[in-house]
Image (spheres, rainbow, N blue to C red):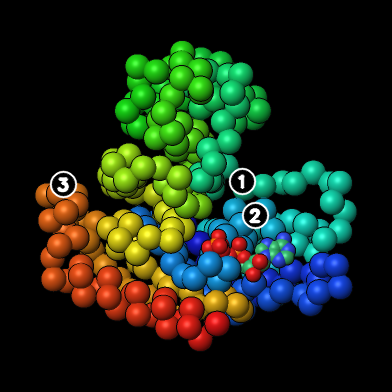
Amino acid sequence: MNTLEIHDVSVVYPAAQGGDPVTALSEVNLNIEQGDFVVALGASGCGKTTLLNLIAGFIAPTKGYLTLGSSPIEGYPRVACGLDIGDEIVGPGADRGVVFQKHALLPWLNVIENTEFGLKLQGVDKQERRERAASYLKLVGLEDFHQHKVYQLSGGMQQRVGIARALTNNPEMLLLDEPLGALDALTRESLQELLLDVWRETNKMMFFITHSVDEALLLATRLIVMSPRPGRITHEFKIDFNQQFLDCRDARKVKSSEAFIAMREQVLAIIHGDEAAAA
Ligand SMILES: Nc1ncnc2c1ncn2[C@@H]1O[C@H](COP(=O)(O)OP(=O)(O)OP(=O)(O)O)[C@@H](O)[C@H]1O
């Protein structure tokens, strides 16, 4: 059973056009175990995406290091320090799947071709990649849409394809950067439920970024709150509203409970306090 370990990680972006270097993260430590659903909250610019990009291996830390199991996550230092931009970006290994707010699907491919795309790049043979893609499309409720083109799908369905695609490698960890931010409220709720079902079914590590406190409270087993620049993890809460939701399937009931409302107030006070301090 692998653990993601983040040790004393700092990220400093180089100065651009005469400005100062930006310390986006400072001395961040975090361990994520199998089955953890970690949600990161914090004011805009506190370094949430930087942290996700580090875990994905899109960038490398300026200080500190990350490991997944016994393997280092090496990232791509030359991107972080602004050199050798022409080189190939290595991106996450097969053990980490990434879902972005913009699903980045390929419009000329149909749903199953988009879902199996990563497997095709890895040279997995057609029958196997079709089977794997089909099983994850079933998991996200798109078993009847294999042949549809991306533009024939709603935003929520496109995001389901993005989730299925990230799962096809059977990664140990899913990294989700505001994946539901562009969706209407009802679609967003149904995708929250889907993500909890996927998490419960697969027991994967999840690292999820959102600006919505309600969404964070509903999804997380561990909620981390980050401070404005330089980004640090200032608070962590272990919560189980997601289990309550999975038991009753009634988000409104969970969100109207005294415990949920009290936790929402506590978290909002931290974030608003941070924003005021930053201003
Ligand atoms: N490539 C870069 N070069 C220079 N500064 C950067 C770069 N990427 C991010 N930053 C800065 O680093 C800080 C953290 O950015 P990051 O995107 O990680 O924050 P965030 O919490 O995800 O923000 P948001 O909630 O607005 O998406 C910000 O001040 C941002 O402007």
Secondary structure state at the residue bearing disc 3: loop
User: For residue 105, which quarter of the picture?
Assistant: top right
Q: Which mark is residue 249?
A: 3
Q: Which mark is residue 123?
A: none
Query: How far separated are the C-alphas under marks 3 and 1?
Result: 34 Å
Secondary structure state at the residue bearing disc 2: loop
User: For residue 144, which quarter of the picture?
Assistant: top left
Secondary structure state at the residue bearing disc 1: loop
Mark 2: few/some/many CA within 10 Å (<14, 14-19, 20+) = many
Mark nearer the viewer, 2 or 3: 3
Q: Which mark is residue 93?
A: 1
Say if mark 1 contacts mark 2, CB within 8 Å. yes
Which quadrant is home to the N terminus?
Answer: bottom left
Residue 136: image x %, image y %?
40, 30
Residue 134: image x %, image y %?
41, 22
Residue 218: image x %, image y %?
27, 58
Mark 1: few/some/many CA within 10 Å (<14, 14-19, 20+) = few
Q: Which mark is residue 57?
A: 2
Q: Identify the mark nearer the N-term, 1 or 2.
A: 2
Vertical position of residue 71 compared to residue 100: above or below: below
Residue at coordinates 35% horizontally, 74% vertically from top-left? 268
Mark nearer the viewer, 1 or 2: 2
Vertical position of residue 149 compared to residue 157: above or below: above
Identify which amino acid the numbered label 3 is placed on: Arg
Identify which amino acid the numbered label 2 is placed on: Gly
Residue at coordinates 69% horizontally, 68% vertically from top-left? 61
**Would residue 85 be seen by someone viewing this image from the given angle?**
yes
Mark 3: few/some/many CA within 10 Å (<14, 14-19, 20+) = few
Residue lying farthest to the bottom in this orientation? 277
Q: Identify the mark nearer the N-term, 3 or 1.
A: 1
Mark nearer the viewer, 3 or 1: 3
Which quadrant is home to the C terminus?
Answer: bottom right
